[in-house]
Structures are given as structure tokens and as C-alpha cells.
Amino acid sequence: MFLLLLLVTAGVTGYEGYRRLNAMNARVEDLGREVHHIGQLAEASAESAHAADAHATEAANNARAAAGARVQAEQLQKQAESRQSQAETAAQQAQQQADQAQQQADQARDQLAELRRQREAELNHVQEVLSHIVATRRTQSGLVISLPDSTFKFDFDSSELKPKNRELLSRIAGILLVVKGYGLSVYGYSDDVGTQDYNQKLSVRRAQAVREYLVNAGIDAGVVNVKGFGKTSPLVEGHSEAARSKNRRVEIALTDTMIKYGAEVPGR
């Protein structure tokens, strides 16, 4: 009886131990699965953390690049503003220079107009005075004093000035001495009798004689030049004595050297 009880007690005790062992093993397995799951979660968290770190690094790099781009953009903006300011300053200076140049041009034009007016008035006065003693006509750049054969005669084949010629030239020189800023050209002309070579040389000799007299009368030799045209520039056409008498002449051209004008044809 006792042995049976002992066996029963041992059997019960063994079964309880077996049950507890199974329960413990089940718990261990559950814990193992929890640990594995936690490990997976940890790995996932680590991967997420790594990805987040990579994203953070990329974001930081992007932020630094953006900051650098912003700084560069600000520098470019400052450079552009500086260039614009320089351009505006240069434009203002250019406009000021243009205004000054225009003002100077206007002043020069006004001064030239005033000078022309003064020279015009002076030429009119000189012409009026000369016209009382000798034929004088206006040209684009001055005056031409005509000394025709009828009033300023030379002997045949001669360039010697007669007393009457000298008297007339003295009166002309007295008037020309008071005007300044003019050049003088003495032109000699002949009629159509004789060869071109002969008449050319004769016209030069007679023009030279007039020049020498004017210089001796006090006119600056540096402003007086001479040219002979011979029979190449007749005043009138024809072969009559009247025509030839008009073509035999000396002309004194008074040319303004302070104001430049267009070219003129001597003897016209």
C-alpha cells in the first residue's frame, strides 16, 4: 500500500515536472522568437537609421551646395549691380561729354557766324572804298580788283609801271594796308596776239611788277603771290581790238585767310 502510494506520488510528481518542463520549453521558444523579432526590429531600425543618416548627409551636402550657390549668386548680383552702376556712370559721363561737345560746337558755330558777319561787313566796306578808284567785284572768299588796259596800260612788250599805274597802285596799297587776315594774288593776263609762251612770260612779268610795287609800298611780301595766265583766260571772247584791250589786264585777288571758302576760278 505504501509502495503504491509512493509510486503514485512519484508518478504525479514526474508528470508535474514534465508538464512544467514542457511549459518552460515553450516559454523559451517564445522568448527565442521574441528575441529574433526584436533582432529583426533592431536591424530594421539600424537600416532606417543608416538611411536617415545618409539622407541627412545628402541634405547637409545639398544645403552646403545651396549655400555656396546662394553666395555665388549674391556675388554675381553684386558684380552685376557694380557693372550696371559703372555703365550708368559711364553713360552719364558720355552724355556730359556729348553735351559739352555740342555746347562747344554751338559756340564755335556762333563765333564763326559772328566772324563771317564781321568779315562780310569789312569786305563790303573795303569794296565800297576801292570802288571809288578802281573796278572791284565780290567773290566767294573776298574781292577782285581789276586793272584793265584802259586804265592800267603797259607799253608794248614791257612790264615797266608807268607813273599813272604807280599812282593807282599807291592808292590801292594804302587801302589794303589797313585790312588784316587776307592774302593777295596778283594775276596777269594778255590778249591773243603772239604765242602762248610769249604771252605767258609777259603776263608773269607784269604781275610780278605789280607785286613788287605793293610790297615796296608796305604790304607783307609773304601774303602776296603771282601767277600769269597768258592768253588762256580771256575776259571776253573775240579778236577785235576792243576785246583784246579788255583781255589785257592785271587782277589783284583779295582772299580771306581767316575763313576757308570753296575754290574759285581766277579771272572769273
Image (cartoon, rainbow, N blue to C red):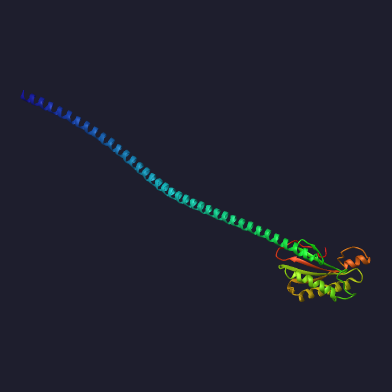
Q: Quadrant of the N terminus?
A: top left
- Residue 104, relative to residue 56: is it above or below? below
Q: Quadrant of the C terminus?
A: bottom right
- Residue 65, relative to residue 97: is it above or below? above
Image location of residue 106, percent across then percent down:
64, 56
* Front-most of residues 203 and 18: 203
Q: Quadrant of residue 93?
A: bottom right
Residue 106 as seen in the image, left or right of residue 175: left
Image location of residue 41, percent across then percent down:
30, 37
Image location of residue 228, percent across then percent down:
83, 70
Q: Residue at x 12, y 28 (%)?
A: 13
Q: Residue at x 33, y 41 (%)?
A: 49
Image location of residue 82, percent across then percent down:
49, 53
Q: Quadrant of residue 112?
A: bottom right
Q: Residue furthest top?
A: 1
Residue 9 as seen in the image, left or right of residue 104: left
